[in-house]
Amino acid sequence: MLHSEIATLPNFFQEINFVTRSSPEIYPFNLLTIQFQYTPETLQRAHELHYKKFIPLQGRLLLYLGLLSAWAGVLLLLVKGGGNNLWFSLPLILYGIIAVISHIRLTRTIGKRAYKKLSDYHDPMTMEIGEENVSLIIGDHRNVIPWSDFKKALITEEMVLLYPNEKIFFIFPEKNFAGEEYSSFCELVKTKVEKVY
């Protein structure tokens, strides 16, 4: 597994691009061989969906603290006026502004930072999806993940996120499926994963 430079980020990300098929059937899958690679845009959107669904407060904590600090500083300035009170109100306002700007910057660049962290994994990799497991193939190494290891899944109109634990997920973007494949894949996920959101 890969370790993220940001503690709150999921540690492992896969962007799936369906390019080859070993079975003509759409559902159920006997075996589907696919290739994928990371892009900052897909990582960005996956993180947004992840935080919005599972940890909305943590994802916006810095923003809320910044707004609260700035509002407290403004109120202190209005109620107590200038003079010596500026030494109390201005730092609160300044901290609030810095916190809000930091939040905006961090949330808008999360995909780029995750992509940069995964610099050794920019080349396409191969994944095989079968009825019993999902296999990730990188060079000569094969990691087999039974469907039972996926604890939960998030299905949206844009992508599917499969979670072997709370901070690791695999990404399957809808845009990389042809025809009705995405809908069929979503149905497969619903039959294989216990918790689907």
Image (cartoon, grey):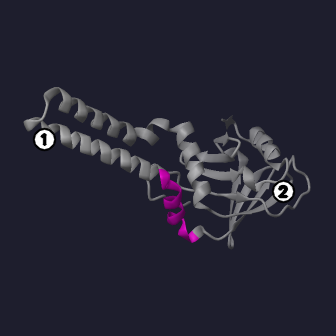
136 within the magenta span: no
Task: Please provide percent x and percent y for residue 108.
Answer: 49, 52
The residue depicted at 19 percent of the width and 41 percent of the height is: 90
83 up-or-down from 45: above or below: above
Q: How many marks?
A: 2
**Neighbourhood count class around disc 2 (C-alpha, 10 Å): few under 14, some 14–19, many 20 upward:** some
Prevailing secondary structure of the magenta residues = helix
**Neighbourhood count class around disc 1 (C-alpha, 10 Å): few under 14, some 14–19, many 20 upward:** few
In the visual, does 153 lie left or right of 168?
A: right
Residue extending farthest to the right is: 24
54 up-or-down from 164: above or below: above
Mark 1 residue element: helix
The residue depicted at 64 percent of the width and 57 percent of the height is: 14
Task: Please provide percent x and percent y for residue 107.
Answer: 47, 49
- Rendered-image quadrant of the C terminus: top right
In the visual, does 140 lie left or right of 77?
A: right
The residue depicted at 75 percent of the width and 43 percent of the height is: 189
Mark 2 residue element: strand
User: Contact, CB < 8 Å: mark 1 with mark 2?
Assistant: no
Pick the front one: 188 or 192: 188
Quarter of the image for residue 74 reads: top left
Whole-number angstrom distance, CA of label 1 to CA of label 2 = 67 Å
- Rendered-image quadrant of the N terminus: bottom right
Q: What range is drawn magenta here? A: 108-120
Q: Which residue is mark 2?
A: 31
Q: Which residue is mark 1?
A: 87
Pick the front one: 59 or 33: 59
Task: Please provide percent x and percent y for residue 111.
Answer: 53, 56
Q: Which badge, 1 or 2, comes first in the chain's sequence?
A: 2
**What amino acid type should be assigned to the residue bearing mark 1?**
Trp
Residue extending farthest to the left is: 84
